[in-house]
């Protein structure tokens, strides 16, 4: 667990909580190897989550593009 927490500014218990949430969501699976609990990414649920998020990304990107166009139009009118 220490090697997972090392690059982040959060504690090992916080990393453990995050991993439990990811495991409960089916995005990772954890096994046992002596005293280690290796984690494995689960590709199918991650792809489904990415697809769901992609719809929101497209929505917000389009909204920001329309906002940019409106702001450009308002600046041109000044």
Image: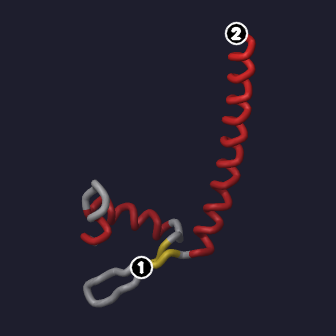
Q: Residue shown at 48%/68% (left/top)?
A: 24
Q: Residue shown at 69%/29% (left/top)?
A: 67
Relative height, residue 44 to residue 35 (above, below): above
Q: Residue shown at 25%/58% (left/top)?
A: 11
Quarter of the figure with the C terminus: top right
Residue 72 in the image: x percent, y percent?
70, 23
Label 2 environment density (alpha carbons within 10 Å; few <14, some 14–19, many ≥20): few
Q: How many marks?
A: 2
Relative height, residue 6 to residue 37 (above, below): above
Task: State the SS at label 1.
Answer: strand
Please tell me the numbered disc located at residue 22.
none
Q: Answer with the quarter of the image where residue 68 lies.
A: top right
Residue 38 in the image: x percent, y percent?
37, 81
Q: Which residue is mark 2?
A: 78
Relative height, residue 28 to residue 56 (above, below): below
With 42 as the anchor, is 2 left or right in this view?
left
Q: Which residue is mark 1?
A: 30
* Separation of marks 2 and 1 at Cα, in angstroms: 60 Å
Q: Answer with the quarter of the image where residue 5 lies.
A: bottom left
């Amino acid at each position: 667990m220490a090697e997972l927490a090392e690059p982040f500014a959060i504690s090992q218990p916080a990393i453990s909580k995050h991993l439990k949430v990811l495991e409960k969501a089916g995005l990772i699976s954890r096994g046992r190897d002596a005293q280690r609990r290796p984690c494995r990414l689960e590709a199918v649920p991650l792809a489904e989550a990415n697809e769901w998020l992609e719809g929101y990304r497209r929505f917000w990107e389009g909204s920001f593009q329309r906002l940019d166009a409106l702001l450009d139009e308002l600046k041109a009118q000044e």
